[in-house]
Image (tube, rainbow, N blue to C red):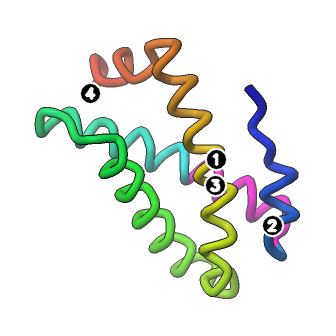
Amino acid sequence: MSLNVGKLLASVAISAAQASDIVGKAVFFVQMVETAAEAVGGLPGAEKLTAVREALEGYIKAQFPDLSPQFAALWGEVSAIVSGLVALYNATGFFRSLLKKA
């Protein structure tokens, strides 16, 4: 599996530092949404992805307002990264170990 941050950089006018920050926040939001979903007995994947999208969109609006109008293009690439991470986390049991710590 390849997480192509280069494709993210090419998708919109975004710096490497911004891409790194956005991907880092996406990872954080995935972990927080997964933890919150487990606390309420679980949620469908589509609802969790929507929650990650909304959190990330709010973060980008606050931290990178110049990127906000490009969020749809940005999300296309970030969602692919998020999906790859979720698949990796599920395959390795990362979420189970994360939830045991919470």
Name the mark on residue 80: 1
Identify the magenta region: 14-25
Question: Measuring 64% from the left and 55% from the top, which residue is drawn there?
Answer: 78
- CA distance separating discs 3 and 2: 10 Å
Q: Earlier in the sequence, mark 2 or mark 1?
A: 2
Q: Amino acid at mark 4?
A: Ala
Question: Measuring 75% from the left and 38% from the top, which residue is drawn there?
Answer: 3
Counting from the top left corner in percent of width and height, residue 70 is at: 67, 80
Q: Earlier in the sequence, mark 3 or mark 2?
A: 2
* Contact between labelled residues 2 and 3, with CB atoms less than 8 Å apart: no
> Which SS class for mark 3?
helix
Q: Which residue is mark 4?
A: 102
Select label 4 or label 2 by which is in front: 2
- CA distance separating discs 4 and 2: 35 Å
Q: Amino acid at mark 3?
A: Val
Counting from the top left corner in percent of width and height, residue 69 is at: 63, 87
